[in-house]
Image (cartoon, rainbow, N blue to C red):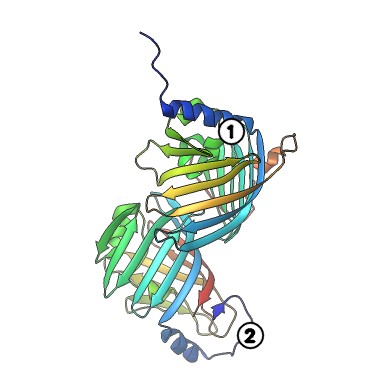
Amino acid sequence: CSIKPQTDGPILSAKQRLERIEQLQHFELTATMGIRSPADNVSGSLHWQQQGEDYQARMTNFLGIRIFSLASSAGSTRLQVQGEDYQASNSTELMLALTGWSLPLDDMSLWLKGLAGDNASAKEYDALGRLIAFELLDRSGYRWQVRYQRFFPDGLALPRNIEVQSDDFHIKLVIRSWQL
Amino acid sequence: DYASEPSDSEQASKALQQQLADMTRFYARFEQQVFDMQQQLVQQGEGELWLQQPGKFRYQMELPEPILFVGDGETLWYYHELLEQVTIYDAKAELERTPFTLLMSNDASLWQQYRISQLDDGYRIQSVDPASPVQYLQLHFTAAGLNIMQVLDLNGQRSIFHFQPQPDVGSDFATDLFQFQPPADVDIDDQR
């Protein structure tokens, strides 16, 4: 089903909501994404497709030009940027080297859903017990601050506005729709 | 010695610049379709485009999300409503940001940065800059004017704009159409 802003749906306890989100292994989302970095300012549509551990992602700008595409399966990731194909074990590092900007890709399939992985600290929760911020230390040693400003107004309350910040990069995500 | 024969590209470029110069004003609704390398439809868009000589344009996309790209020949404003962010560029220094500054420019030096080839119903425009993210831009014309614009990127992804041009009303569009006043709470990123 496609989750657009709706106000129906059962009210879940924080624990029930967390369990349901953790069980969510297959989902698709379409988001507006903006990445501001010292090197450049990039924005466009992000499409993310998750199947268990594997995911495919692509970002396209408003003119229809592909900014990047990513395919991760069985732990290895293929990254395509500016018409060139790369195989990466650390895609965050590789994207930074290729484009001058990056985002915490290793845990992205978790933080997109509003979950903090094992590398998270300084977790903050709102009155409804939903995770609204945490700090992430990725395996390259970059520290990221993840913040959820808005959730979809249904029982599952998946994230709608996410901001991810490190010293050099400021990423804004406005999720337009979830397909579960 | 005698003047060297103008190359095909120079002749095509002259012809294209003349055709665009004759298009003093242009307004159309457009539909956009983006196909990936496997010809899968990956994105669709809709919006309106205003063009006016020299150098002025307003690209107002409604779907898939509200995006506004405005240029007055000197300055480019890129307003991303959902991100509450406007980026300001120098129009002539950032030709690759959109094709519209070039298409509406009467500055021959800008055109020298591109190789033009003639198609049976239009032109193919290729940047001489190897770092350009675009393989080529194609413009297709009918009697009613600019009909199709195609952008092919380095990954082989193709973005096709279908225009429904409105007849020219014969008078200039309002000047503030080609300027942008950022709303109060918007992040301004001035790249000039």
Position of A91 with respect to B162 (left or right) is: left
Q: Are marks 2 and 1 on the same chain?
A: no
Q: Is residue B89 among the parts visible in the rendering?
A: yes
Q: Find residue B20 and name its label.
A: 1
Identify the secondary structure beneath mark 1.
helix
Residue pushed farthest top? B1
Give the distance between the C-alpha atoms of the residues marked 2 and 1, in whole angstroms.
Answer: 53 Å
On screen, residue B104 above or below A81: above
Q: Where does the image place residue A7, in percent across and percent down from the top left?
A: 64, 82
Identify the secondary structure beneath mark 2.
loop
Q: Where does the image place residue A86, in percent across and percent down from the top left?
A: 27, 59
Residue pushed farthest front? B120
- The disc labelled 2 sits on which kind of residue? Asp
Q: Quadrant of residue B51?
A: top right
Position of A39 with respect to B176 (left or right) is: left
Chain hosting mark 1: B
Seen at 32% across and 76% down, the residue is A119
Q: Is residue B179 among the parts visible in the rendering?
A: no
Q: Find residue A8 and name its label.
A: 2
Q: Where does the image place residue A95, in percent across and percent down from the top left?
A: 32, 58
- Frontmost residue, A120 versus B57: B57
